[in-house]
Amino acid sequence: MDNRIQTDLRSRPLMGIGTPAVGGHLYGLRSIGEEFQMDVPVSRLRTADGKFFTIRPPDVTERDRVQEERNAFAMAANAILEEEKARVARELHDDLAQSLTALKMDTIWVRDNAAIAPEAAVAKLTNMLETLDRTIGATRRIAADLRPLLLDDLGLVPAIEWLVGNFTQRCGVACKLSVDEELELQEPYATAVFRIVQESLANVAKHAGASEVAVVIDKVPRAVMLTVRDNGCGFVTAVPRKPQSLGLMGLRERAQLLGGSIAINSALGHGTLVEMYIPLPQSGVPE
């Protein structure tokens, strides 16, 4: 890039001696002669000693930190996605493909032996039905991992009630849910709220060491408010997170994708509070 720069002097008129006229910007010239605006505000200042230009470079430390964090999250999330694809491929091969192969072989056997060994054919068919039941169960499990079927079949509230109940049963942690039974959200908001609750409870199970969790979902005018509070060990929010720690960053990304925001309050020995705000258009779907 050419190191020459020029300033935009077509900002508002000077307001008097010693008064800056804010609004100018620095412009750079690329090596090909193309002009571009630089993100550095410029002010003009006229004093008794003459006219000066002042430059106020912004502090981009926080912006760069957030960008680096997002880049790290994107790379890690992509790696996780590839791992998930590999897991699904293994399950399809190990569970479904092998079961279907066994069923095909048993079907051929029954075709060839039903007339000469009817009792053995009946026993074989009984085993085949058991294999079919296991195959159906494996198919439903794989599908549920990819997409919460309860969300499609029963709606958001029953799906979250199941999620909370399953969390308590699996982790032995009491979890209280407060939600309007009439709450209905269209996509992509229903899936986002479900996944946010799911990821929040997963974070509690992995890191909090809590004995109680409270989940509250409120629908306010044109928005959904979601809070998850636990009485676990807590953590220092100012300490940088480990690169492989994606839970809280994942929550932020989900909220930001829908134009929302998230606040995380925690302290050692005092548990963690996650508060999330997701705006809704009037129709409940993206505008």
Image: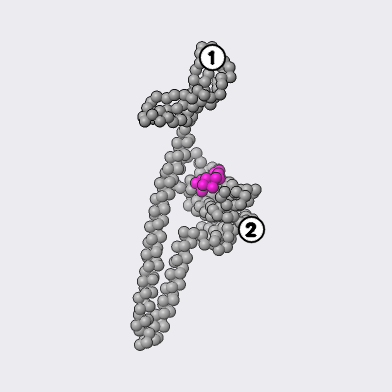
The percent coordinates of residue 224 (x first, y second) are 60, 49
Labels 2 & 1 near each other (Cβ < 8 A): no
* Mark 2 secondary-structure assignment: loop
Residue 26: x %, y % from top left: 46, 26
Between 5 and 209, which is closer to the camera in this rendering? 5
Q: Residue at x 38, y 57 (%)?
A: 86
Q: Residue at the spot x=41%, y=77% of the render?
A: 127
Q: Amino acid at mark 2?
A: Glu
The crowding category of the residue bearing disc 1, from other C-alpha atoms within 10 Å (few below 14, some 14 to 19, many at least 20), is: few
Residue 255 in view = no
Q: Which residues are magenta?
A: 252-264
The x and y percentages for residue 117 are 36, 86
Disc marking residue 130: none
- Distance from the alpha carbon under mark 2 to that under mark 1: 67 Å
Q: How many marks?
A: 2
Task: Please tell me whether residue 45 is drawn above or below residue 271 in the rendered image.
Answer: above
Q: Nearer the viewer, residue 232 or 31?
A: 31
User: Which is in the foreground here, disc 2 or disc 1?
Assistant: 1
The numbered mark at residue 181 is 2
Residue found at x 50% / y 39%:
238
Quadrant of the rendered image containing residue 121 = bottom left
The residue at 34%/83% (across/down) is 112
Q: Is residue 160 left or right of residue 66?
A: right
Residue type, label 1? Thr
Q: Locate residue 12 relative to residue 60 in the image: left or right.
A: right
Can residue 182 be seen? Answer: yes
